[in-house]
Image: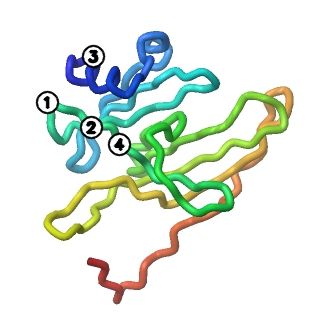
Amino acid sequence: MPRQLVLAAEQVRCDYKADIKEVPIHFISAGNRRLALVFCRSVVMGSHHVFDFENLRKPKLVELPFIAQKEGFGTTPRPGLMTWKRDAGVFEAVTGSDTCLHSEVRHTYRLGVTEGWVSQVASFVVVRVEARANYCGGTRGDWTTVWEAPPWPASTVVR
């Protein structure tokens, strides 16, 4: 593991050492981004953390958008268990619990660009949120779309 990534993970109190053999670090090159997905253990459940290597000397922890039940959207550095679906060009993050009668939530992200006052900033864009029931005995329900980003009208210019 690169020293810079070790320092960045330790700064955010990421306990990656305990699970690194079972959940290895994934280095991803997507678009013009270089990212690392690092699994970090926590008391209840672990989550991946995403580190951006825009500056190779100082990887930066990325906060991702997530749906906040009944509240709208927020951001989090702990999006859940993440996978990169290269063919589709999206990341999927699943959160939930392994206890009976619980639900799981899956966020689907794509990399996008947000135009700021001075420059463009690469960002994660949430495009879909799905949920499914987690029943006793390991049986899971089907994913149901809770929210999906509508396509922007072609005539809309956002700056």
Residue contact between numbered discs 1 and 4, judged by CB atoms under 8 Å: no
Q: Give amino acid for label 2.
A: Lys
- The image's colour scheme reads rainbow
Please tell me whether residue 30 is drawn above or below residue 44 in the rendered image.
below
- Tell me the residue that label 4 is attached to: 62
Q: Give amino acid for label 3.
A: Met
Tag nearer the camera, 1 or 3: 1
Q: Quick one: SS at disc 1?
A: loop
Residue 60 marker: 2
Query: Left or right: where does residue 27 sit relative to residue 95?
Result: left
Of the numbered discs 3 and 2, the one sitting upstream in the chain is 3
Residue contact between numbered discs 2 and 4, judged by CB atoms under 8 Å: yes
Of the numbered discs 1 and 3, the one sitting upstream in the chain is 3
Of the numbered discs 3 and 4, the one sitting upstream in the chain is 3
x and y percentages locating residue 136 in the rendered image: 86, 30
Q: Quadrant of residue 44?
A: top right
Distance from the alpha carbon under mark 1 to that under mark 4 = 16 Å
Query: Left or right: where does residue 84 sit relative to residue 80?
Result: left
Distance from the alpha carbon under mark 3 to that under mark 4 = 18 Å
Of the numbered discs 1 and 4, the one sitting upstream in the chain is 1
User: Outermost residue, bottom direction?
Assistant: 155
Residue 1 marker: 3
Q: Residues within 10 Å of mark 4 (few under 14, many from 20)?
A: some
x and y percentages locating residue 107 in the rendered image: 54, 50
Please tell me whether residue 153 is drawn above or below residue 118 in the rendered image.
below
Q: Nearer the viewer, residue 94 or 4?
A: 4
Query: Left or right: where does residue 53 sit relative to residue 129?
Result: left
- Tell me the residue that label 1 is attached to: 57
Quarter of the image with the N terminus is: top left
Q: Give amino acid for label 4.
A: Val
Tag nearer the camera, 3 or 4: 4
Q: Quick one: SS at disc 3?
A: loop
